[in-house]
Amino acid sequence: MKKIHNLFDKLYKIESLKKFKPVIQAADFFLFGTEETTTSAPHISDNMDIKRYMIMVVIALLPSTFASIYYYGWRAVAIILVSYIVGGIVEVTFAVIRGHDVEEGFLVTGLIFPLVLPPTIPLWIVGVGIFFGTFFGKEVFGGTGKNTFNPALVGRIFITIAFPVFMSANWYEPFTSGLGGFLHYAPDVVTSATPLASIKAGVELPYSYIDLFLGKAPGSMGETFRLGIIIGGLFLIATKIVNWRIPVAYLGSVFVLSSLGNIVMPETIASPGLQLLSGGLLFGAFFMATDPVSSPFTKIGKWIYGICLGLFTILIRSFSGYTEGVMFSIILMNGFTPLIDSIILQIKYKPIKKRSEAVLNER
Amino acid sequence: MKVNYKKFSTGGYEFKDFKGNPINKVIDMEIPQTLTIPLKQGFGGEVSVIVKPGEYVKAGQIIGIDKNAISSPVHSSINGIVEEIKTIKHLNKEVNAVVIKSDGTKEWQPLEGHSREWNKLSTEQIQKLLYMSGVTSLDKSGIPTIFKSSVISPEQVENVIVYGIGTEPFNISLSVLLQDERKSQFVTGLKILKKVMSNAKFYLAVNKKNSKLIQELNNLLFDVDWIELYALPPKYPLELDEVLIPTILGKKYPYGYLAANIGVIALSMQTVTQVYDAVVQGKPLIERTVALGGTGWKENVHMKVRVGTSIEDITSLYLKEHESYRLILNSMLTNKSLTSKSLPMDRTSSVLIALKENKEREVFSWLRAGKNKDSYSNAFLCSLMKVSNKSCDTNIHGEYRSCISCGFCEDVCPVDIIPHLIQKYVKKNMLDEEVIDYGIFNCIGCNLCSYVCTSKIDVAKDIREGQEKLTKDECGRDTIVEPYFDLIGLKEFKNL
Ligand code: SF4
Ligand code: SF4
């Protein structure tokens, strides 16, 4: 440890590496933590920091990550690696250019992005997607904390539009027996239909609810092992990393709206059980809609946001040409986030000055 | 007496199980050789000195008094000779202080007119005793008397709240403060105060987990109908007037003003015991019980120290050597650190904290289970453990980052504003009516938002800066508070 320590000290001093200080510093702090102390009251500081915050999300994503390897082989790891490497390079490049710190947000973005991709995706598209997502979804807005849209989603939507063939035509049948994908690089049985597509086409589903719950039906890599997603999501809520309001509002409104819709239009609107257990709804509700930066910060705003998400998801799934509506709904609502917040703020905080003049006049 | 259990749900945070909590042991400190007694202590202005260098003074003798300005007298707390009168920087203000060299004796001179049969004393006599003892200068608004000890008169007090909740990471122990016969003396203290502020309704605010104390107080006060007990959760910052008063009385607080301005006086339990001491035993305010909190002390005892004892006299006895510690008086969350060990303990001191200066880097700190890491979030193991031994030090435990709107600051804010929103307005220098509407002036500076911030942003400091700038531009608090409240004693408050 001491040796590595000294190495960093040397690196800081090399003149030609001055420009790369953010990178060296990121590695340094990653290993050793900080020596910074408080300067005034409060003299103590919570142990929570961004690294811990992000790592908790990564931990919550681990069940889905392992499931993606189990169901789709080691290729899943290759996809995740490409995403981390390309995403990391973009983040680091911008840190160097702007001369600010490397922000840990990419640890989460770099993992969420591959998990929402179809397992058949060519690796180069993964690279393109994460590049586009971090670049246009985050960096052009000024980096972590300033982005309007969820960067992983921006990347995902971009490649959906740019490379539609790769994104929705082919799906793998997951491995479901024995050690599954842990013994394979990639599955070879290709199927054309995900459960959502079957529902849309009005075909009888070959999967039971249990299959859907455990991930035995085809779908995006990390979206199918729903048991793990729920566990991960509840873990995040229990640790207070994720606010419970958005998932509850989102899933709740999907449930209520599809129950009602299913009664009125059973042909077009699938039943609530299927809605909740298919596509990327659970994953989106727990891991993407809850991104604190791109969702409303006001409490009532969170409810509105979640309810609208549910509404749009059902609408897109049932009435549009697309089979899945989760991602489009989230991106759409990301765009409305500032508006929702400002309306809530205006309602909650009435102008004080004007009121006080009124009070004075009364006296 | 009625006992109410009340929740406190708008924000706040319970600091608990920290290493270095004061234990139930009291030590009488020896009389130090010299004392430095500041002429401004507690509520009110600086008093004028009435002794000269070379003069012999007795413990309990008044050495500074100013009958015309809002203040309470200051006493010598030892027998000895006045050495000099000098200016010191005490609690970030330049004040004059009297240096006294002790002759080594312990005796003190009792107040004139005190009586075991306090009930037979007239209200004026009691008020005189309180004033002459200096007890009237304690806590945020002082205790009103016919003398100029607070900004309002005793008849104007509608509510008196006496608190002993213990909401800071380190608190003075109530079992020490109200040991044995002290409990009934405390109750007598309450009755004395009631005699002075006869129009007031009294409230006791106690930690709801301290059921033993609640029971005992209930036994002592069962036939008293002018007092109510509130059992509250020990959440910081419930002991601040700005939060305590709305929680108990359901009244709006004029942020930035005194509780006295709305007819409320909030007192700590130690104050009430000292009221008893003054009136019944004739003891002037020359001694305080001070708890030693934090891991820097060899033993976390309580000490009875004479007012004016220098911090060094305590640290030389109890502070651990070989490591560096930051010394803070009373509150780690709101008070500045003590810059010099030669500064004196004054009559408002109740906890002296030695917090470890921690510049050490922790390898893979973000990956640790965190058995003793305190956090508002539940991301560390210790939030699962019933009893833990949380450590605290000055390290910030993370790196400065940009705000990710995690919302922790909003969740803990006790006055229901959105700290990160206001902080962003201040940072962008958008200081206009809008941030005032968002409640920038509601911020009471409890610093909890800075404590919890994931991105290590000093949110509270930025908000404070915004308040100062607005005040400079004549858009200060007064413009939004004064029209809404019928404030009493406002003129006196402004002259302070
Ligand atoms: S706690 Fe810090 S990071 Fe979180 S919302 Fe508040 S200011 Fe932003
Ligand atoms: S310092 Fe101000 S803004 Fe921060 S938590 Fe306390 S009252 Fe709220």
Image (cartoon, coloured by chain):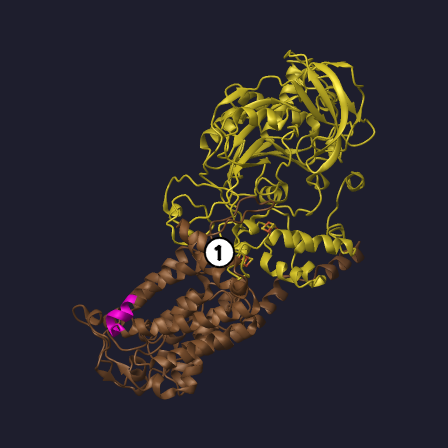
Chain colours: A brown, B yellow
Residue at x 53% of width, y 59% of height: B401
- Give the quarter of the figure containing the N terminus of chain B: top right
Question: Residue A236: where, in percent of width, then height?
Answer: 40, 59
Q: Of B45 and A298, which appears nearest the observer?
A: B45
Which quarter of the image is occupied by the C terminus of chain B?
A: top right
Picture coordinates of residue A176 (x, y %)? 20, 72
Numbered circles on residues, count: 1
Q: Is residue B26 left or right of residue A39?
A: left
Read off the residue under disc 1. Answer: A10
* Residue B307 appears anywhere in the view: yes
* Image quadrant assignment for residue B79: top right
For image coordinates 53% across by 40% down, the residue present is B357
Amino acid at pointer 1: Lys
**Range shown magenta:** A66-74
Crowd around label 1: few <14 · some 14–19 · many ≥20 (10 Å): few
Which subunit holds the residue at mark 1? A
